Image: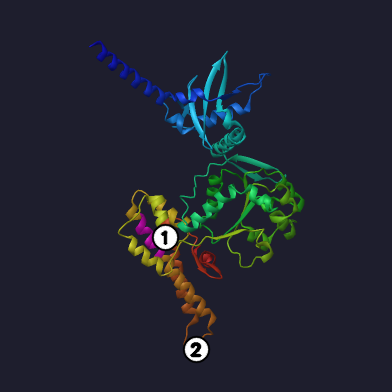
Amino acid sequence: MFFQYSIWFLALVLGFVAIALKKWRVGDWFQAYQLFKVPEFNENMQENYLYRRVSVYINSLVALEDSDFTNLLSGKKANEIVLAMDPNQTVHDTFLGARVSWTNAHANSCRTFVLKIRKRDKRRILRPYLQHIHTVFDEFEQRKKEVSLYMNGADGRWRSVPFSHPSTLETIAMDSDLKNRVKSDLESFLKSKQYYHRLGRVWKRSFLLYGPSGTGKSSFVAAMAKFLCYDVYDVDLSRVSDDSDLKQLLLQTRTKSVIVVEDLDRFVVGKTTTLTFSGVLNFMDGLLNSCCGDERVMVFTMNNKDHIDPAMLRPGRVDVHIFFPLCDFNSFKTLANSYLGVKDHKLFPQLEEIFQTGATLSPAEIGEIMIVNRSSPSRALKSVITALQINGDSRSAAKIGRRSADKPPRPSDEAGDHSGLLCRESVHTVREFRNLYGFLRLKSNRKSGSLDLDSNLNERLR
């Protein structure tokens, strides 16, 4: 009996030993380790910046979230929860196939992180691992960075305000394939510092956004800045006195910034300052830009680029051209989802048919209609249908008017009566549109430009 109990007891002990070996990795006891301390303060009681970087890195590890216990703390933003190590807690990490551990040590009121690495792995991974920690920290800081909007004043200096524009790439009404290509281009740019420098090129990217007013160019700039977490420098060329002033503004910009020049075509056509065309070209891609243009994105917006000197739009000055059209049915569905939360509706087939006839509005106009009628999606869609029909009728009337004006009058024609009839119909539709929605920027677009009905009928409406 005693022998039988001894065997049972020995089996029980061996079972506990096996569990301990598996859980505590007793094999590690026979490995030679080296410890590295990262104290919060140095010997002069100055802050050790590496300590903060290590803290951010450790708190981002999945192993901390999966550990037996950890601290949950409230972050700076509303509803933000942050994970943090407990004193003397140990968290494991893996890098390049090597297993390391971090211990949050507290001794003599001095907080210290202790890194434990096998000696055989130290030479291979220590420096790359520390560089990896720096990279993760920089990416974290970039994501949480508060973006600012800078505007140039008449004195040639930048003034900043917090940039809290709500637009994102997800909310932009744009073809999904084009949007994905833009996102991919921006992500590739963020990772291409070494590639650009190897080519001997400045690490910058430039975009031209062109299309009719109200099609979302400014919102797209805001979405780009938020996606990149870059500050925005909005250059008002009417406040720039000369070429030297423009150079000084460029010198004062910082890295990780989006430099925006809106309505560049208007400046080129009717500039009112002593700023020269050559000065603008050098601002876009000159020697000074190559000296202080690293890690920047430049964005230029225009309503129409057909009459712009090709030298301004050549590759190197402008890398990517993006056209912003008036609404088609696909972009309308994006707007309906964003503004009304509607992904499908029984009125969608009718709307699609109307869009196919060529009737269209800008995203800003459709968005305004949806905002006014947001409490009733059906009413909002019906209002969009009415507005599109009015726009289509106005476009047809404008085309007939242009054809009539091009033809010489015949004796049997009553030119005055026809002209008056067209104008009265146009005035009626414009008044109806204003009564419905309280605004009007009706435009009839052609490939060569746009016809503003508002300017033609302004005197008759008063």
Percent x, y of residue 38: 60, 24
**Residue closer to the observer: 384 or 199:** 199
- Identity of the amino acid at label 2? Pro
Residue at 53% in and 41% down = 164
Can you identify the residue that label 2 sits on?
411
Magenta stretch: includes residue 357: no
Looking at this rendering, what residue extends furthest in the left direction?
1
Q: Secondary structure at mark 2?
A: loop
In the displayed structure image, the side of residue 244 where residue 190 appears, left or right: left
In the displayed structure image, the side of residue 399 where residue 208 appears, left or right: right
Work out how far the residue at label 1 is from the one at label 2, CA to CA, in angstroms.
Answer: 48 Å
Residue 330, numbered circle = 1
Per the rendered image, the range of residues in magenta is 380-388
**Residue closer to the observer: 456 or 236:** 236
Q: Is residue 48 above or below residue 439?
A: above
Percent x, y of residue 22: 40, 26
Closer to the chain start, of discs 1 and 2, is 1
Say if residue 27 shows up in the picture.
yes
Q: How many marks?
A: 2
Viewport quadrant of the N terminus? top left
Q: Secondary structure at mark 1?
A: helix
